[in-house]
Image: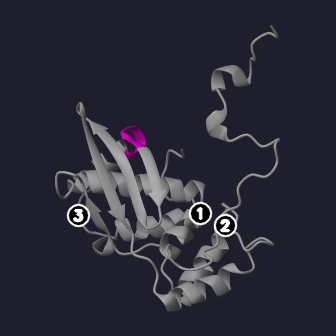
Amino acid sequence: MTREFGCTAWGKAWLRRLEPLASGGPDPDRVRARGLARRAVREFRVQGTQVSAVLGERGREHVITLTVPPWTPDEIRTARRRLRSTAGPSGTLPEDLPDELAAELEAAGPRIAPDPGELTASTPSGPPRRAHLLAVCYALVQRVDEEPALAVRLRMAGAQDVPTPPAPTSPSLIPLAELDPRLFYDPPPPG
């Protein structure tokens, strides 16, 4: 996971919505949320327009579900037209989308990220604390930086024929999560 937030135009689009220009000092909830996103958010999942994560803090676990509003049908049509040149032969999007495409998409109308007031969040025990909600949002920004197509899939969820990234087809590709860094540079002797 990247350590900073908004390293790509896709992640920056989310940050612009989360951190509007404000006068005054730093927002303590945002400062705390960034730290929580780096160290306390785990089990991060995206399914359709739902983002869920477990946030562990002070010996307690908080399960937070965030719902991202999808684009309108007109916005989806506009996005599809803009994304068509990037999609592969099967109509799927690569995980890494060019930053220029983010600017082009927003200039055409569809906003990559919704306003914070459009997001809905819940926990099993009621509304989440603001810092916890922001932590999940910052964790989402990190994921969007790593996989810009996620920003598009979140906003197009529920639409027919939504472009999705292809699954690895080459047997020589290994997901990074399956690599053990302790053995990567110094493999054990054949045995």
Q: Earlier in the sequence, mark 3 or mark 2?
A: 3
Picture layout, residue 118 above or below residue 75: above
| Dot 3 amino acid type | Gly
Residue 148 marker: 1
Verify CB contact (< 8 Å) between mark 2 and mark 1: yes
Q: Which residue is mark 2?
A: 97
Evaluate whether residue 30 shows in this view: no
Q: Which residues are magenta?
A: 37-42
Label 2: which secondary element: loop
Q: Nearer the viewer, residue 133 or 3?
A: 133
Instruction: Tell whether 64 sits left or right of 143.
Output: left
Q: Residues within 10 Å of mark 3 (few under 14, many from 20)?
A: few
Residue 186 magenta-drawn? no
Say which of 165 and 143 sits in front.
165
| Mark 1: amino acid | Pro
| Residue 69 location (% of width, % of height) | 39, 75
